[in-house]
Amino acid sequence: MIPKFTLHTESEETPVFVEENAIEHIGLWVSERRIPPIVVVVSDSTVADLYADKLLSSLSQSGLKSELITVPPGDQSKCLSQLDGIFDKLGDLHVQRDGMLVALGGGVVTDLTGFAAATWMRGIEYANCPTTLEADVDASLGGKTGINHAAGKNMVGAFHHPQFVAVDPTCLKTLPARDISAGLAESIKHALIADASFLDWHEANAESIRSVDSTVMTELITRNLQIKASVVEQDEREGSVRACLNFGHTIGHAVEKLSNYQMRHGEAVAIGMLAAAHISFRKGLLDGPAIERIRTLIRRFNLPIQADGLSPQDIIELTLGDKKIRAGKRQWVLLDGIGKFTITDDVDAGIIAESVTIVCGD
Ligand code: GLY
């Protein structure tokens, strides 16, 4: 079995496999590289019930010794105490630098496991086996790992690339429809910032995407990860263009937080993308029909187009406190037409207020 493609960065080569029943091949992909004395699978209890047996038996069929660690499902597990719990177990299992972790789960599990791998004994190897669409198309690739802190989401982290990414689109069959939609927001984001033809593709294949057709989802995931890889290859550490991956996240993060995390990340990003599209329109970068097209696609994928019940003023205040402000100035990722982005700190406060007000339905 050959990878769909390989991400090449200064620090790592990361093969990316996207295929049905990929979980059953993970033992092979680990053992082809080397035989770690122990492979520790980290998952959440919901995903572990569904897929851990398959993964553990794949590891054992390849002659690998393995153990399973589970954390509770949900964003609250992306925290110091769960990380500490993982470290306790790695200590009990005598995992040394030649040990390896495999993350089996959504973005919470891949971020947490990646950060455990980045920091245990100053860094050990890990692989990502994402099981949600958000993680399939985004979190699983690119080396960002971390946990949340009272100071903000993803406040504590490290860049540490997985040895490989193995996406199994059959896992999407057990994913709730709301989580499929949330992942599609990131897919729309990638199309909007990098590939107009990919947006056409979403429109042409919308029904197959909505019904989670395996062939179409394999193509969707692969194209997303290829877009992400090409951005990361240009700017691994987000010194410049990688910031384009934050399109829709500036206002989206504020919306997500103000919803008390009742909204999925992708739902908040959908609203944030519409606000950013409106800002792009007001700056003369995007035309009205393009905004309508984005809004229609977002609705077609059952994503929200308004942050009902949230205060525009609260969103604006929180947006200005975001950690991605450089030298006191907020950087905005805007669309310069469909399929092309631009980054600027030159956005009038009145335009921001107007755009936020629109997505609040006021
Ligand atoms: N999810 C944005 C990034 O990886 O840079």
Image (cartoon, helix red, strand yellow):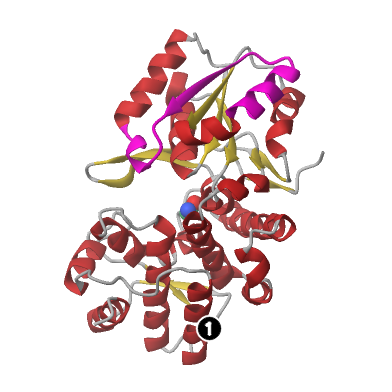
Q: Is residue 44 visible?
A: yes
Residue 93: give x, y in percent of width and height.
49, 10
Where's the N terminus, which quadrant?
A: top right
Compared to residue 94, the image places residue 97 above or below, namely: below
Where's the C terminus, which quadrant?
A: bottom left
Depth check, front residue: 26 or 276:
26
Amino acid type of the residue that numbered disc 1 sits on in the rendered structure: Arg
Compared to residue 209, the image places residue 360 above or below, namely: below
Residue 342: give x, y in percent of width and height.
47, 73
Q: For residue 347, which quarter of the picture?
A: bottom left
Label 1 element class = helix
Q: Is residue 159 visible?
A: no
Compared to residue 117, the image places residue 171 above or below, namely: below
Q: For residue 146, which quarter of the picture?
A: top left
Residue 265: give x, y in percent of width and height.
40, 56
Residue 56: give x, y in percent of width and height.
63, 23
Ligand 1 under 8 Å from disc 1 Cβ: no
Q: Which residues are magenta?
A: 52-79
Depth check, front residue: 47 or 287:
47
Q: For residue 262, which quarter of the picture?
A: bottom left
Q: Residue at x 57, y 34 (%)?
A: 50
Q: Residue at x 73, y 49 (%)?
A: 5
> Is residue 262 located in the magenta-colored stretch of the structure?
no
**Left or right of residue 346: residue 210:** right
The residue that label 1 is drawn on is 293
The residue carrying pointer 1 sits among few (fewer than 14), some (14 to 19) or many (20 or more) residues within 10 Å by Cα, namely few
**Left or right of residue 228: residue 347:** left
Q: Residue at x 23, y 67 (%)?
A: 315
Compared to residue 72, the image places residue 259 above or below, namely: below
